[in-house]
Each structure stands twice: as structure tokens, then as C-alpha cells.
Image (cartoon, grey):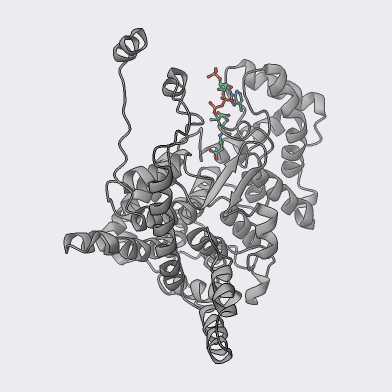
Amino acid sequence: MISLTINRAAMRAAMPARQQLAASQAVRYASTKSLKDAVAEVVPQKQEQLKKFRSEHGDKSLGDIKVENLIGGMRGLKVMLWEGSVLDANTGITFHGKSIPDCEKVLPGAGDLGLQGKEMLPESMLWLLLTGNVPSKEEVKGLSEELAAKGKLPSYVEKIIDSFPKTLHPMTQFAGAVGALNHDSKFAQGYKDGIKKTEYWKPTLDDSIDLIAKLPAIAARIYYNVFGRGDGVQKIDPKKDLIGNYSEMIGYGDNEGMTDYLRLYIAIHGDHEGGNVSAHTAHLVGSALSDPYLSYSAALLGLAGPLHGLANQEVLGWALGMQEKVGKNASEEDIKEFLWSTLKSGRVVPGYGHAVLRMPDPRFSALSRFCDTRPELKNSSIVQLVQKTSKVAPEVLKEHGKTKNPYPNVDAASGCVLYEYGLKEWSYYTVIFGISRAIGALPQLVMDRALGLPIERPKSMSLDALEAFVKK
Ligand code: CMX
């Protein structure tokens, strides 16, 4: 994407002095624009970029489709447009070209907004994912305030959540409550009222911001109902950031380490390009012009699968099982033995392997770095066990010889830190991932509509049809 800064610099060079002064004031003014204004600036550029690219390269091939791809979960096929991030097998995730360490350097963090803590704010990541640009501190502050103002749940949704049985998995409750918010969808109403296709992205963005604002309160209410922890009323302080408020709602407002961990976790789990189950589901369901609440509710149900987001719950259960068996100061040999017993019983080692990555997940590295810098986590036996396992497991998985990627993924680390901070209810862990994934999946839905992408409808084939096809 051509950056706005370059455009403006080139324009300024060609301007007389008086106009230059006005332009620099305009730029200063623009640095405190709202997210909606920032997206409105980007949309025409993206539309133009797509139009030009399509007319110049629409007939270029992106590779063959083999029978193996059709049977094998479509691995590696380039079949989706996804703007926010790109995942490279050997270098990991980049968000509009920025790696996680880059983001940690440039995205406004808690301290920049005068809040306690150091980690980057999910609001900053949301801005980057939606616009491709790094927001100013003022812009992030404005977005935080907007999210706080929109964060309260309507009472009918509170009642729906309260009516769920406590034994219903928190992810099922989460998806149910998110879907119910479609009652007030601006997109659904706009569509009914016949708004133009070129305007679809605007109410989609309104709904997306509204939903992202409300996810913490939904998640906190579920936590309170199921586990009896948190403030019980999902109070929102307009001066706090999205996750500062969430942390307070679930009872960790005074815990700076936990609040900062949640910020980091939620910022870096947001987007992992488009093909993963949750992101792809949001895009697929959204392609039928289902509104953001319906699309994201479906995404959450995909996230709830054990091979995807539920893995963070699985990892913790598995790691605690190991700790019970091998004790707190396990040797590498003890860990290896436990890994083999898991593999020999026909189970996967949770938190290891990846459909795309062929290296340790940079998100795992970022969470490990967090553990290393927090004194309260340094002596945690479960954190130490998870870190030790990450050194031993790749060897064992290589010897086992099945997984294409023997290294830890993000889920290997995420749960043990929550556990150490006292959030021990593992069946809740994927809900936190669910707050995060919206920050990546919903911006793409806005872009899908800004670019007028069509309903997704790949071709399927029966086994008989395939056999006939290859015999031709
Ligand atoms: N332990 C044991 N075996 C594993 C394994 C693991 N961690 N990861 C992959 N394998 C096995 C697969 O089950 C498969 O075996 P079969 O041929 O018998 O079916 C074989 O290795 C090849 O799989 P792959 O091509 O390497 O991996 P896939 O792309 O099919 O699957 C994933 C990727 C993540 C589902 C898989 O590695 C896995 O099940 N990992 C454990 C669960 C997990 O941590 N999921 C979280 C992923 C991260 C995320 O979604 O955010």
C-alpha cells in the first residue's frame, strides 16, 4: 500500500508556502482523527489499488491445485485476500509488514497513554490492522474512549447470558451472546433500508467497533456467572483502556502484571492472516452479508475447536498433568518420557505444530519474553516447566517424525501465565483468545465490504467425480 505520508510529502513539495502551512496544520489535525475517518482515507486507495491490480493481473496463475490440496485441508493454496497480516512459514507473522518486535517498538502502549504498564495496546493493533498505519497516542486514546463509551451490554444480552447453564462451555456462551447482539446491527438495518453497496463498509465498521467494545463485558459476565469471580457488574471506567477495563471486570484491576499480559496477549493474537479457522469463518460467513455479530459468532465457534483456539485450554491441562507426574523440578529426561507417553497414546502434543509455520511461533517468543521480564513469573514452576518443555519437545517431535513443524505455537505459553497469575479456570482461556481474534477478523470484514468482494463459493467435488476427472 502507498503510505499516506509519502503522498502528503510529495504534495507538499509542489505547494506554495502558505498552502504548505495549511497542509501541515491539516496533518497535525489529522493525527487526532477518529478511526472511522482514518479508514475512510484508506478505503478509496485500496479500492483503486484492487481495481488496477485486477485489470493488470486478473489472469495470472497463483499455482496449481493438486488432488492432495483438495483432500489435505487446502494447505498452502492462495485463495483468499487478507489485508491485515501475512504469515510466512520461516519468518512468522507480520502486521502490515511489521513483525511483533517492530510493533512492540512503534505501537502506542499503556505507558504512552499514562496508564500503568508497558505493553502495546490492542487498540493500537486494531488501528494498524484497519488502516495499515501506526496511530498516534492521541488517536489511540480517542479510540480507547470510544470503546469505553460503547462497552456496556444491553440488558437483553445480560439476561441471555444469565440464562445459560453454568455447565455450558464458556465459548458456547460467548458465541451465543455475540450472535444475539445482531438485534441492534446497523449493517443489518442499513441493508434492510437499501443502502448502496459502496456504503456497506461504514455500518460494518460501526458494528465492528461496537462489538469489539462489548466483548470484554460479555467475557467478564460469563466469567462471573460460571466461576463467581470478577466485579459482577462489568463496570467501565471511561479513563481506562479496553483491557484495563476488562482486567478490572474479571478481578485483576490491581494486578499490573496480569493486566499488561492481557494487553500483550490480546494484541498479538488478533490476526494470523486469513486461512486459520476463526478468521476464515468470519470472512466466509460475512461474505453472505451476515452482519459482524453473526459472522464473529460463527468465528468463535470455530475458535472453540481443540485443534485451534481450544488448544490453550488443552495445553494447561496437559502441562499440569505432566507436573503431577514428574514433579516440580522435572529433568529433561522426565519431560521427554512424558512427551512420548502422550504420543504413544495416539494424542497430539498440544501447543506444538502449525499448519503454516515451520519455526517457533514468534507469538510464543513474545510471551516467553514477557515471562522473562516479570520477576513474579521467574520462579513459577508451571512457567518453568512450559519453557523447559519447549526446549525438549522439538527433538522428540522430530524423532516421532509426523508433525511438519515440531516447534511450540502460541498456545504452548499462553495459558501457564494466566494460571500463574491466578486465573486457573482453563475452560475460560479460549474466551480471552476470542476477545482478541475480533481485532483481526473484523477489520477484514470491513475491507471485504469496502472492496466489494463477492460471496465465497469454492467448488467441491465428490470422490467419484474426482476419479472420473483424473482419468480424463
Ligand atoms: N503432536 C503430535 N502429532 C502432531 C502434532 C503434535 N503437536 N502436530 C501435528 N501432528 C501430526 C498430525 O496429527 C498429522 O498426523 P496424521 O498424519 O496421523 O494425521 C501429522 O503430524 C502431520 O500434521 P501437520 O501437517 O504437521 O499439521 P497440520 O497442518 O495437519 O495441523 C495443527 C496443524 C496445529 C492442527 C497440529 O500441529 C496440531 O494438532 N497441534 C496440536 C494442537 C495445537 O496446538 N493447536 C493450536 C494451533 C495454533 C492455533 O490454532 O492458533
Number of labels in the image equals 0
- Name the foreground residue: 231 vs 277: 277
Q: Which image quadrant is residue 27 in?
A: bottom right
Q: Is residue 103 at all visible to an observer of this figure?
A: yes
Q: Is residue 108 above or below residue 455?
A: below
Most extreme residue toward the top, as rendered? 471
Residue at position x 45%, y 38% in the image: 277
Q: Is residue 69 left or right of residue 414?
A: left
- Name the foreground residue: 363 vs 9: 9
Most extreme residue toward the left, as rendered? 193
Residue at position x 55%, y 32% in the image: 355
Q: Is residue 16 above or below residue 201?
A: below
- The location of residue 170, given as percent across then percent down, is 43, 46
- The location of residue 174, given as percent across then percent down, is 40, 50
- Name the foreground residue: 316 vs 34: 34
- The location of residue 470, given as percent across then percent down, is 37, 11
In the picture, the quarter occupied by the C terminus is top left
Q: Which image quadrant is residue 7 in?
A: bottom right
Q: Is residue 147 left or right of residue 365?
A: left
Q: Is residue 232 left or right of residue 352?
A: left
- The location of residue 201, given as percent across then percent down, is 34, 61
Q: Is residue 239 at all visible to an observer of this figure?
A: no
Residue at position x 51%, y 47% in the image: 428
- Name the foreground residue: 170 vs 456: 456
Q: Is residue 324 above or below residue 452?
A: above
Q: Is residue 218 left or right of residue 455?
A: right
Q: Quadrant of ligand 1?
A: top right
Q: Is residue 309 above or below residue 465?
A: below
